[in-house]
Image (cartoon, coloured by chain):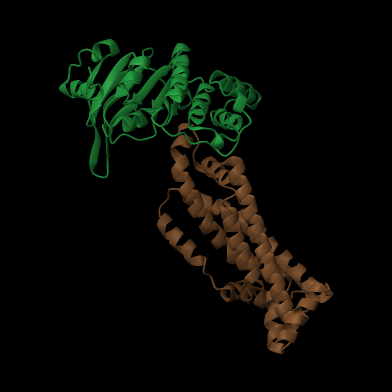
Amino acid sequence: MLDAILGGLRLVATLDLRLWEIVALSLAVSLSAVVFATLLGLPLGAAIAVGRFRGRQAVIVVLNALMGLPPVVVGLFVYLLLSRAGPLGELGLLFTPPAMVIAQTILIVPIIAALARQAVEDAWREYEEQLRSLGVQGLRGALTVLWDIRFSLLTAVLAGLGRASAEVGAVMIVGGNIDGVTRVMTTTIALETSKGDLPLALGLGMVLIAIVLALNAAAQMIRDAAQRRYG
Amino acid sequence: MNGILPLRLERVSFAAGGRTIIEPLDLTLEAGASTVILGANGAGKSVLMRLMHGLLAPSTGRVAWSTEGPRRRQAMVFQRPVMLRRSALANVVYALDAAGVPVGQQLRLAREALQEVGLAYAAGRPARVLSGGEQQRLALARAWALHPEVLFLDEPTANLDPGATREIEAVIKAFDVAGTKIVMSTHSLGQARRLGDEVIFLHQGRVAERAPIDRFFPQPASPEAAAFVKGELPWA
C-alpha cells in the first residue's frame, strides 16, 4: 500500500509523460464542456428565473431533477446519437474527445442552469422594481442581473466543473477509454485499479484532487476580491 | 411642449391577496405644485405611488397620463435604492442608455447629473460601497439625468441621518426649481412642510383629505388627519 502511494508520488513528481498526457486531455475535455455548458446554462437559467410563462414550475422541477442525471445514462444517450446507425453517426465523432465534450456538456448544463436560476431569481427580487422603473425588463433585465451577480455565478460554474471532471460513466461510454486518444483521469483510475496498477491510479487521484482544490481556492479568492471591490 | 401631466386616476383601486390596500379613488395631479402624500405606515402610500408610476397595475379603474408613452418622462426614487455593481457614473449611464439616450450624450449627461447632486468626487467609485446618503443622491442623479417631468419619491430619507436628509432635500428642491413635478411620500411632517405645496392625506387606503400645506397643518379638516398631525407633533 505504502509502495503504491510512493509510486504514485514519484509519477507525479517526475512529470511522467504518460500521466501528464492523461491529465492534459482530462482538463481539455472538462474545461471545454464547462465553457459550452456555461454559455448555454447561464442564459437558460436567467430566462427561467425572470420569465413568466405557463408550466414554469414544472420546468424548474425538471431542471432541478436533471442535476442528478446519471452520467452513464447521458453516455448511453450520446452513444446512441453518435453511433454509426444513429442520427449524428455520419459525423464520425464516437470514441473521440469531441464526443466526450458533448456528453459532459449535456451532463452539466442542468447543474449550471439550475444553480443560476436560483441565484438570478433571488437577485431579481431585489432588482426588479428598480429596473422596471428605469424601463428595463425581459431579456435586458435578465442580462443585467446576470452580469451584476457574475462573481456569485462562479459557484454554479465550479459545481459544473466538479461534476464534469469527476464523472466516469459518460466519458467511458462515448470515449471508449482508448489509450492515448480518449483516456482521461477518471477512466484511467478505474481501469488501472482493476488491473492492479495502483501507483498510476493513485498518482492521478492526487492530481485530480489537487486540481479541484486549486480551482475552488482560485474562485474563492476572486469572489472575495470582487466583494471587497464592488460590494 | 406637450406635457404628460395632468395625471388622472379614475376609480383606481388595488387589492392583493384578498386584502384591499387602496379603496376606489379619483385623483388628478397637475403640473407645478409639489405634492406630499402623508399617512401612517400601511396607509397605502407606497402602493399609491407605484400605481401612479406604473409599477403596479390597478385592480380596477385606470391611470391615465395626458400623452402616451410616459415611461421615459417620469422617474422614481425608492426608499432603498438598488445600485448595480459598477461605478456611480456607470449606474447613471445605464439609466440613460435604458431610456434610449444616444450613446454620444450619455457620459456628458451622467457627469452633469453627478455634479448636480454633489457626487462628482465619487464618479469612479463602485456604487454599492457608497454610504446610504450617497447612494440615495446617486439615485437622484440617475433621475436627474433623465430630466423627468414627474419625479416620484417613496420615503427617500427614511433610512438616513439628519445630515444626509438635508442634502437629499436640497436636491429635491433643485428638481422643483428646474420644473419637475414632485410627488413624494413621507411620514415626516417636518419634511412635508419643507418640501410640499399640497398634502394628500391617506388613511386606510382612502384619501381622507387633500389640502394646501399651509391650510393642512394649522387646521386639518378630517378627524384622521387631525389625529395624525397631533400624534406626530405632541407638543403642538
| Percent x, y of residue A61 | 44, 62
Q: Kindly tell me whether residue B74 is visible in this rendering.
A: no
Residue A104 vertical position relative to residue B76 in the rendered view, above or below: below
Residue located 69% across and 78% down the image: A187
- Closer to the camera, B4 or A104? A104
Compared across the picture, whether B68 is left or right of A73 comes to: left
Please name the residue shown 42% across and 60% down the image. A58
Which of the 4 quarters of the picture holds residue A9? bottom right
Query: In this view of the protein, which residue sits in the foreground, A82 or A178?
Result: A178
Task: Name the spot of residue A199 as percent of width and height, x first.
Answer: 75, 82
| Chain corresponding to brown in the figure | A
| Image x and y of residue B188, in percent | 32, 24
From the viewer's perspective, is residue A128 above or below residue A190?
above
Name the image quarter holding the C terminus of chain B: top left
Extreme residue in the left direction? B223
| Residue A36 picture location, percent across and down | 65, 58
Can I make out residue A169 in this image?
yes
Q: How many marks?
A: 0
Q: Which chain is green?
A: B
